[in-house]
Image (tube, rainbow, N blue to C red):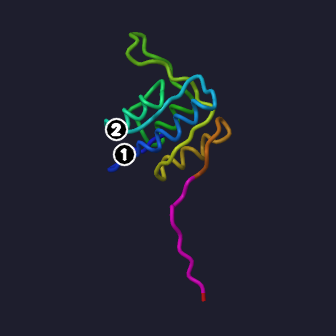
Amino acid sequence: YAPGGRYPLPSSVLMTVVTARSAGCPHVVLASPRPAPITLAAAHVAGADIVLGIGGAQAIGCMAYGISGSDDGVRPPVPPCDVIVGPGNKWVTAAKSLVNGHCGIDMLAGPSGGLVIAE
């Protein structure tokens, strides 16, 4: 999964897709809402097989359970993924917690910073 918010993260695409390819995954699926050109370029360079233009919980569900292809061949089938990795917002994290067990996940990400106030 690669977030597609205000600031595209091609580094997330490279880190996850290249790792999956190096691990020998036969199919690599990338989901990103409104993928920016730099995100698509990173997916191509890294070797993603399928790029889904969806995000959030819908993307996590699609990758966890898979979808069938369309009869006209416009939409290819997406096989259920064994592991889903990558950063995301609270909706992505919630969806990853729901599919954990059906497929593997990297982790349930939280805020990147914390503050401790002690006396």
Farthest residue toward the top?
Answer: 72
Which quadrant, please, contains the C terminus?
A: bottom right
Task: For label 2, count other residues whose C-alpha is less than 10 Å away and answer few (under 14), some (14-19) or many (20+).
Answer: some
Specify the amino acid type for callout 1: Pro
Of 35 and 66, nearer the camera is: 35
SS for dot 2: helix
**Precedes in sequence: disc 2 or disc 1:** 1
SS for dot 1: loop
The x, y position of residue 51, in whole percent, is 43, 29
Boundaries of the magenta span: 109-118
Residue corresponding to mark 2: 38
Viewer-side label of 2, 1:
2
Q: Residue at x 34, y 50 (%)?
A: 7
Can residue 39 be found in the magenta stretch?
Answer: no
Rendering quarter of residue 27: top right
Disc 2 + disc 1, Cβ < 8 Å: yes
Q: In the picture shown, does residue 69 fall above or below 86? A: above
The x, y position of residue 38, in whole percent, is 34, 38
Q: Residue at x 53, y 32 (%)?
A: 63
The x, y position of residue 117, in whole percent, is 56, 82
Q: In the picture shown, does residue 78 fall above or below 32? A: above
Specify the amino acid type for callout 2: Ile
Farthest residue toward the bottom?
Answer: 119
Can residue 117 be found in the magenta stretch?
Answer: yes
The x, y position of residue 82, in whole percent, is 63, 31
Of 96 and 87, nearer the camera is: 87
Q: Residue at x 59, y 30 (%)?
A: 81
Left or right: residue 18 versus residue 31 is right
Distance from the alpha carbon under mark 2 to that under mark 1? 7 Å
Tell me the number on the disc at residue 62.
Answer: none
Residue corresponding to mark 1: 8
What is the chief secondary structure element of the magenta stretch? loop
